[in-house]
Amino acid sequence: AQSVTQLGSHVSVSEGALVLLRCNYSSSVPPYLFWYVQYPNQGLQLLLKYTSAATLVKGINGFEAEFKKSETSFHLTKPSAHMSDAAEYFCAVSEGGSQGNLIFGKGTKLSVKP
Amino acid sequence: DTGVSQDPRHKITKRGQNVTFRCDPISEHNRLYWYRQTLGQGPEFLTYFQNEAQLEKSRLLSDRFSAERPKGSFSTLEIQRTEQGDSAMYLCASSLFSSGNGYEQFFGPGTRLTVL
């Protein structure tokens, strides 16, 4: 069965510091992996996705993630945090096939200090 | 450009009442998904449609829940005899399903349900 584990329910960084949000997945087949961001009282916006092409994926707003099969990880990074990055971030996995529904982690809330 | 829209955005109801939510997907998207998100948790899959056919339902979708997608366009999610445990954000997502597109799903703003 698929699952996603996000380490750290809350991460706090200073403005300009590196952002690192951790995601580990479990999947019996090569997965599709996604990072979504959610601002308060809003839906989810796709940041980036991995679909078995390049292992380093670049997304919107300066975020990127690296797929590491040996570590079953898909950590999200950004070199320099902005105040506007404060939000909740969700990692999700899909095994593809004919269904395509997403399995989400519990989320990591990112706070950015001035 | 219109994304996924959901109506209403907020719904407050009394326990035991029925509620219905609507989702309008991105035009020409053939797949439509419903998720439920409770406080402090990630979204959990409820059900999905390909065109008008409901292809899978999660065990989270009790008999009090029913979803439809007539004509393969908008979808409705009805909850009968609401319970306090139904209080959550109900998210709709749509996608244009094809092999190799990564199953990217576009989410609506959600309907927040509060059951008193």
Image (tube, grey):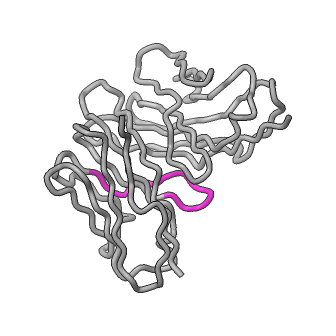
Whether residue B76 is situated above or below residue A29 in the rendered picture? below
Whether residue B95 is situated above or below residue A17 in the rendered picture? below
Drawn side of residue B70 relative to residue A78, left or right? left
Drawn side of residue A87 relative to residue B105, left or right? right
Quadrant where the C terminus of chain B is found in the figure: bottom right
Q: Position of residue A2 (x, y in %)?
A: 44, 43
Whether residue A23 is situated above or below residue B12 in the rendered picture? above
Q: Position of residue A49 (x, y in %)?
A: 47, 27
- Total number of numbered labels? 0
| Residue in the image at 33% along x and 50% along y | B33
Quadrant where the N terminus of chain B is found in the figure: top left
Drawn side of residue B24 relative to residue B90, left or right? left
Whether residue B69 is situated above or below residue A5 in the rendered picture? below
Along the line of sight, the residue nearer the viewer: B70 or B97: B70
- Residue pushed farthest top? A54
Q: Position of residue B66 (x, y in %)?
A: 27, 68
Along the line of sight, the residue nearer the viewer: A77 or B18: B18
- Residue pushed farthest front? B1
> Is B62 in the magenta?
no
| Residue in the image at 71% along x and 29% along y | A20
| Residue in the image at 76% along x and 24% along y | A18
| Residue in the image at 39% along x and 83% along y | B17
**What residue range appears in magenta?**
B37-48
Q: Position of residue B80 (x, y in %)?
A: 33, 78
- Residue pushed farthest left? B71
Along the line of sight, the residue nearer the viewer: B45 or B22: B22
